[in-house]
Amino acid sequence: MRLPPFTLVQANRSKAAVSGLREPGPFKRDLLELSELLTKGSSSKSHVQGGAEDRGLTGLSSFKTGLQRTLASSLRRRVLSASDISVVADDLNHSRKSKVVGLWDLRSWVGGLPHIIEHLNRAQSDLTFFEVQASIPSGLVQDAERVAFRATQMLRRKLKPTEKKDMRAAIVDVDFLPSASRVRKSLGVDYLIALTGAAIAGEIDEKAGRTFHTDFFFSSDKHVCLASTEGLREFAKIAKRPFEMAAAYVAVAGLLAAMNPKVDTHEDRTSGCLFDYNYDRSTIVLGLKKPLIEDRCLKDIREENRETAQSLVRALANYKPPGKQATKLPRPKKKAVAS
């Protein structure tokens, strides 16, 4: 089965395979096969025909071992071709500081995900997005009774009547994020954003104190994030935007929160900012119509990430579904910085 080039498929890993770099095994063979491909250069093709592809392949040798292993495994299983990997390497080499971001669809059924990924990759030079295919953990969504039990454990007290009323089937963020972290490390990506069609539940600090909600649009922890598309299909229709754009909207918000520890959702007003809490989930329609980052939130984003954040917001605003895309523009180059 052939997949779009910007796809990472998690390979099955046995205990023996974990030590694949030290002992003979399938993963070591995969790396050796990729290494042979990387070092072939133009020997198997004419310099004119093969030069660009070979340079792209050779560039993969500078990437993390986990990412090399993932791509090598896909190459061996013919999920990706040498040409696909060349396209990936060329994009990753566009910026030496480029970070790799995986978007993992946990039954949120975002059919246009490859198209929005291509669009986000063209829009900026600091991040390269991939669609991730990996095994979905069992027992991911917990029923309302179990969620209520986890809430009492986390809050270390009985639930208030208003909190009990809020309990429903959901993914408890702290129960899922460690699994996502393991998937991230095995793939060799810098950040992993998981998209789910289920509700997200977790603990939150409000003015009245610590409480528990089951309506988060996203929840982040360091290099991993869980983002919910619950209700987004209908909200996207109201905003007259494609569903994949709406899914990318919450994914980008979660990613920027993960990349910038000072960034947090704000409760005081709803403006269409990526970081509106949206107590009434339908108010996200404002942001889908006209994505933005408020000045106060932009100040909380690290200076080196601000240009990328603004480029991503513009890309979301300008996205059109396949068949309606505007003329493709080359990916902007990283500006040289005087030493």
Image: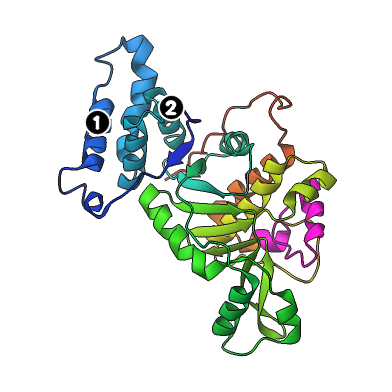
Quadrant for the N terminus, please.
top left
Which image quarter: residue 123?
Answer: top right
Residue in the picture at 30% in, 45% down = 65
Q: Is residue 138 left or right of residue 321?
A: left
Residue in the picture at 24% in, 22% down = 40
- Count neighbours of disc 1 (C-alpha within 10 A) and say few if under 14, some if 14 to 19, many if 20 or more: some
**Residue type, label 2:** Asp
Image coordinates for residue 328, horizontal then vertical, percent: 64, 25
Residue in the picture at 61% in, 33% down = 115
Tell whether label 2 touches label 1 (CB within 8 Å): no
Residue range corresponding to the magenta coloring = 274-298
**Colouring:** rainbow
Upstream in the sequence, badge 1 or badge 2?
A: 1
Q: Is residue 295 magenta?
A: yes
Q: Is residue 286 magenta?
A: yes
Depth order, front residue of 109/292: 109
Q: Is residue 168 visible?
A: yes
Image coordinates for residue 310, horizontal then vertical, percent: 65, 48
Depth order, front residue of 14/189: 14
**Residue type, label 1:** Glu
Label 1 SS: helix
Label 2 SS: helix
Q: Which mark is residue 195?
A: none
Which image quarter: residue 37?
Answer: top left
Task: Say above or below: 154 vs 333.
Answer: below
Farthest residue, direction bottom: 157
Q: Which residue is mark 1?
A: 33
Q: Which residue is mark 2?
A: 84
Image coordinates for residue 116, horizontal then vertical, percent: 63, 38
